[in-house]
Amino acid sequence: MDSTIALFLAQDGITNGAIYALLGLSLVLVFTVTRVIFIPQGEFVAYGALTLVGLETGVVPGTAYLTLVLGIAAFCVDLVRSPDGRQPRVLITRAVSDLGLPLVLLGLSGVVAPANMGPWITVPLAVALVAPMGAYIYRLAFRPLAQATVLTLLIAAVGVHLVMLGLGLVFFGAEGYRATPFTDVSLSLGVIDLGGQSLWVLGVTAVLIVTLWYAFGHTLAGKALRATSINRLGATLVGIPTARSGLIAFILAATLGAISGVLIAPITTIFYDSGFLIGLKGFVAAIIGGLVSYPISAAAAILVGLVEAFASFEASSFKEVIVFTIIIPVLLWQSLRSGHVDEEEE
Amino acid sequence: MINRKWIPAGLILLVALPPLLPVLPDYWITLLNTIGLASLVVIGLVLLTGVGGMTSFGQAAFCGFGAYTTALLTTSLGLSPWLTLPIAILLTCAAAVVLGLLTVRLSGHFLPLGTLAWGISLYYLFGNLEFLGRHDGIPTVPPLSIGGWDFYDDRTVYYVIWSLTILAAVATLNLLDSRVGRSLRALKGGITAAESFGVNTRRAKLVTFVYAAFLAAVAGWAFAHVQRAVNPTPFGLGAGIDYLLMAVIGGVGHVWGAVLGAGAVILLKDQLQTLLPALFGHTGNYETIIFGVLLILLLQFARQGLWGLATRLPWGRLSFVGGLSPTGAPPPSSPSAASLSFPAPSSPTPAPLPALTKRHTPNPDAPLLEVDHVQKTFGGLMAVRDVAFTLAKGEIVALIGPNGAGKSTTFNLITGVLPPTAGAVRFQGRDITGANASEIAAMGMARSFQHVKLLPTMTVLENVMLGAHLRGKAGLARAILRRDRAEERSIRAEAMTQLDRCGLADLAQHQAGTLALGQSRVVEIARALCLDPALLLLDEPAAGLRHGEKQKLAALLTTLRAEGRSILLVEHDMDFVMNQVDRLVVMDFGAKIAEGTPDIIRDDPRVLEAYLGGIE
């Protein structure tokens, strides 16, 4: 391996690592706030990427209809489940967010898809189409189980994963697709060309991480999220609506997933089931961060990306084996570090 | 009413029947075989998830481990499948031990994530290793055979598979209804409680995990010889998720629910795979969508799964399972209000029972308990500072103080739930500082909890039997083979005796979750007594008890002291404390402020100040 290849692999690894960082971040966020080990995080990646491809190729993507269906379902279920939410004001707000929003998005897709409008329109629309799903899925699948054990929530997450995976195949078929890059520009740095798309990935990731860091540290909503993640009961007692925190966490997770999807769609061929494996690599990063630490997860994500890049060059067929075996020493280390067993929540 | 003895025989006959029916197409026999193999894996998962409160996505991978081991050994070395079975089991269990050791010390969600990674790694490893045939796998695995007679036919193989499945189910039921089984079931009630009566929870978790892997290995071994070929696909993560699905759909707390779940999922999948594409006009994984929705709805509306639903039907009452959780218990009548009455001595036991081990006191001259200037800090907060006191044999001492004085923390330091930051604790002359709760329990220290920690779905008797965990010896193998019955009877008798002296014998068969708070506290005392403790630590035993019940508790404590047992109790009921104890230790803001007999403490100005505020 010469230095050019090494640099190329490093670029590749860091680009993928940035995506894993976003996913790891979402997983940590969702887990700490709602205790859900969110297996379907990767599905948002595939949905985001393939929705973008659909919009580019002139097809109204199935996800646009799915968002509407989920919105309607969430609206109806809340109508039945929460009697206090039947006041006109609440009803109107919900109608707008659950029915109006997906309808508008569907209408927009109908206009945008055939018109071939370029990434400045299609990319934000693809993200916007997928992001509300996070909220609807939380309300349909997880909020009714808010008091359940981590194990039950995990199994519910598996259920959501199965549904999203099955629907992904229906919407996008078994073929893989690649989106057009946002830009053709590439930056020449001596021996190596930095791809424009890689720059996009790194730039957007950096902006998102800084924004999130600011939001968590300096806004009321962000502080409420942190409070919920640190102590749910305490947060409830001081008047933080923890269900809303959960909702925000899921919307953020879906948004970050969709953004990851549109970012890598031009670099990697995405199949309907690619998201799962990508999401799991986010998990590896999140596990290294102990499922609680954002900075360690982000750093670990870059490491995962690099290991994957170099492994795919040195022993390509064992790439996945190597990536997923990283967590063994991590678990060992965490295991040795943990002293007395804490009382487990039940 | 059908004689219950005939039910198992009838069931065996029913299971033995299908292959003998010529009208039943081969296809259905194959399907039944698939169900049997899946059940084998899912039974392990039921134990892991429903009983042990852990879960694994890696069961399919363990299955694959077993399958590839036997496939490789039988094809390359020409070994007999019967010879490779133990090897396959041994290798798989070894892998499970390693994986388990890595995760059992961590909190519960690391095991599913660890097994997720294990499942994926192994799938890709199978698919890329040259000597395992890469993605094509190993074809031409020999069939099972006995004395030169090969089991090629699905109808013959059927008997092998279902014998294994039924054996596994019965073994698992036996296991659950045993000393080891109770300790596994105790895992769900929290680590602290289980450790307090001597269960090594890490080991219990590991045993559960390895047992589940063992069943998966057997299923994998059988799979290889039934299919007569192996490739990575049936052992991937998707299959691992399918097994979890079966366990949850069947009812994750029930062994027979595993068979039901496997049957439901496999049959439904089979039907949906032909029905749905026809309905929608093109192919797709529609059944996955249905299963996902089903899973979510089930968790929200019927978390007990199909088996839970079935047992709620009228005929579900005709329970033949025994042992495991709600359905096994006789239908409870409502606990009587005045249930703390002491009944007449129970009828003498007919046969002499093997005696449970009695404890010996290693050093009778040393003070029983010596708390030597212990400290505990949580971050900047000093919860316990420099607390020292001793407790002699046969003495009742109360630890009192206002809320937040550090009493329960002191309890936790003594019983090993928390390690002290400084200082030492000696018990019967031995230094137990830093020993863990189960080791300390083994030395003869038993406790009850301020927040009652009983297992709500187990009967009162089973809960109390858990207290005698350390006094039995029967292990896993004896439990499965039912060689532990004599010891079980002793433990049961001991538990019954303790329940009886606590006045709760008539509640023995009730589910612990149906008891009132006061009764639950007394059950915890009975459980603690089963340990045959030299020292009993009771955390607010009188809280929630009515006046009459308190008097009975007082009488019980007096009897225990007369037996030479020492008692340390935390209690807020001053009447109770002052009349009952020999000495008091008073704490405030983490420090000991006074110590002495009730008369001295009653007039101590520092104590009055702590309780009533400063006197101007």
Image (cartoon, coloured by chain):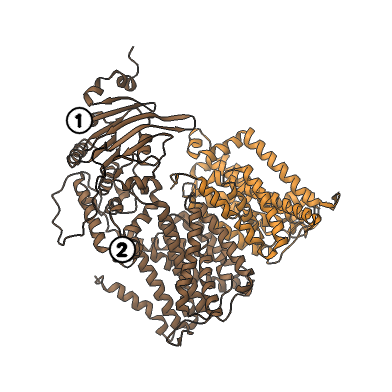
Chain colours: A orange, B brown
| Residue B579: numbered disc | 1
Number of numbered callouts drawn:
2
**Image quarter of residue A268:** bottom right
State the image coordinates of residue A149 (x, y, percent, origin top left): 46, 50
Q: Secondary structure at mark 1?
A: helix
Q: Position of residue B585 (x, y in %)?
A: 29, 28
In the image, residue B128 sits, relative to residue B593, either above or below, namely: below
Numbered circle sitting on residue B322: 2
Q: Is residue A83 visible?
A: yes
On the image, which quarter does residue A88 sit in?
Answer: top right
Closer mark to the observer between disc 1 and disc 2: 1
Q: Numbered disc 1: what chain? A: B
Regarding residue A140, the answer to whether it shows in the image is no
A339 to B126, vertically: above or below: above
Of the residues shown, which amino acid type is indicated by label 1?
Answer: Asn
- The mark that comes first in sequence, 1 or 2, is 2
Q: Which chain is disc 2 placed on?
A: B
